[in-house]
Amino acid sequence: LALAAERKGKDDHPRTYGKEIDYGTAGFRSKAEHLDHILYRMGILAALRSRVKGATVGVMITASHNPVADNGVKLIDPQGEMLEMSWETIATDLANLNDNELSAALIHIIEKENIDLAKPASVFFGRDTRPSSEQLSNAALEGSRVFNADVKDFGIVTTPMLHYFVAAHNSNNEYGDPTVTGYFFKLTTAFRSFREEIISEKGPESGNYQPAIVADMANGVGGPIMKQMSELIKDLLTIEFFNTGEGELNHESGADYVKVRQTLPKRVRIKSKDRCVSFDGDADRIVYYYQDQSVKFRLLDGDRIASLVAGYLRSLLDIMGIELNIGVVQTAYANGASTKYITEVLQIPVACVYTGVKHLHHKAQEFDIGIYFEANGHGTVLFSKKAKVLAKAAREDKSSAHYRLNGGKRGAARKMLTFIDMVNETTGDSISDLLIVETILHARGWSVEDWENSYADLPNRLLKVTVKDRNVIKVIDPECHISEPEGLQEDFDRLISMFTQGRAFVRPSGTEDVVRVYAEANTQSSADKLAVHIAKLVHQKAGGIGDAPTW
Ligand code: G16
């Protein structure tokens, strides 16, 4: 098989791009024309991984928030989680071999991992709407077929849907039905029953909550998928769609654009106080925003979602009267004010980890209820077995004394269990996250302004610096202190100390050829100045290309 794979690789999927590409923050990402051989090889690797795990694995073809000319691929492990990190190295090595080294490398993997090729292999495929995705998907399918895997191609789906399909299939449908209909059914049924529960408790009035949103779909896969789904809940939530596929993917729209620029996406029409959302290109991120009365743009990003969810789940736990270890996981990009609010007001511990959903997911598994969100809007909630068992027991607790003493206990437990069904626990999911946020706002009777009033964000600024080689920056901890280039961290520290409530850091992106800069301070102009100064230092000392960024 290895020899046949090498022959086919040389003939049909030769390596034509010399530069090395790493399995980065979310798999391989590059210009689409550099990726054919990598997709073919990842198809092969998925067939091997499936045999190692004795289960179905996934291959998703997407470059998510990146420009339309880029593409990428990531592997999904059996429970719908990201590929185990030790296999990222195997993937990187395989991707960067010369064509005539492929069979030897495959034999090495097969021997080292003790893979029995007689065992069956099964791989699920999905892709985003990029013009290059179909051809790249075909390359990956060929790779899996060469290694005799059963393949199932879901075609154009959101990234979180493929994660869900893999997890649902491997759970023998216990997690849900591994189909598009099954996915919609799981999420919308939970959304509907939660709303009915609240209405039966409080009546049809929902305080300041209005069941209508404006949705920017970044011209990605979220558009067609959300439109289908919204039909199933249109009596509960009205959605006005923009950027649903008529324009260029992620261009001047989408969660990343809105978050980084802190501005409205182009081509949307909104009125003051409309509650708006933006997805990214493959629908695994979501941010909320609105324009206040003075037409000022107000962003409610992943940190806000984390604090909303954490506060609500904490209150359910309090009513249920059960002790569970609840925690929030963030990265260095989290706004300092959100961390303070979660730890001091909600009294929930916060852990900080390296950027990348894989790191957050892993850490969140340490809690009974682990809420993880990156500021960019990528995140979900994980519930341990213990949390699910205790919630079920509380729901069934019919002891009359208890019932009288804790009137809301069973209702709170029912809500918790319905909430769990609405969450895509495999990865961050724009659609599931949207339903969660809408559910909590409705249950609280909150407008978007009420939500925002829970705390005030510290003004912040994100910038990108283009450098010759982004890997000259070496980050040594999740707070993103750097060890190289030598002396640069000390220069940063001197600068930061000149700003009230100043905090800033840099890190090489794992999805684009840039170094990212984040700064926050007590005023917007200070945050902007700090970000620009830091970016200039990076540009000078880490081999900047072109002009240093300004704001
Ligand atoms: C991916 C990852 C996210 C990460 C983002 C940016 O998002 O899944 O965890 O925050 O890239 O990463 P970096 O700063 O390393 O470029 P997406 O939405 O592009 O899949």
Image (tube, helix red, strand yellow):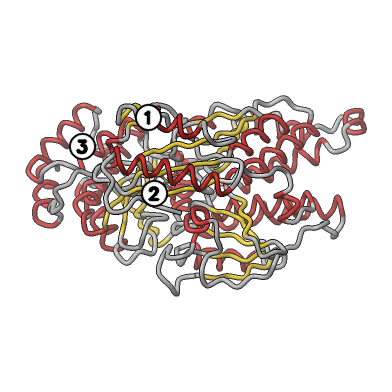
Query: What's the distance in space between the residues labelled 2 and 1, CA to CA?
Result: 17 Å
Depth check, mark 3 against mark 2: the one in front is 2
Query: What's the distance in space between the residues labelled 1 and 3, CA to CA?
Result: 26 Å
Q: Is mark 2 within 8 Å of ligand 1?
A: no
Q: Which residue is mark 3?
A: 93
Cβ atoms under marks 1 and 3 closer than 8 Å: no
Asked if residue 229 can be seen in this view, the reply is: yes
Q: Earlier in the sequence, mark 3 or mark 2?
A: 3
Cβ atoms under marks 2 and 1 closer than 8 Å: no
* Three-letter amino acid code at the position of disc 1: Ile
Left or right side of 246 for 210: right
* Three-letter amino acid code at the position of disc 3: Asp
* Three-letter amino acid code at the position of disc 2: Lys
Asked if residue 120 can be seen in this view, the reply is: no
Cβ atoms under marks 3 and 2 closer than 8 Å: no
Depth check, mark 1 against mark 3: the one in front is 1
Q: Which mark is residue 464?
A: 2
* Residue 443 at x, y percent in the picture: 77, 50
Instruction: Look at 29% across and 39% down and name the residue there.
Output: 542
Question: Outermost residue, front direction?
Answer: 498
Label 3: how many residues lie within 10 Å, few (<14), some (14-19) or many (20+)? some
Q: Which mark is residue 482?
A: 1
Left or right side of 93 for 238: right
Instruction: Look at 48% across and 42% down and name the residue there.
Output: 530
Residue 340 picture quarter: top right
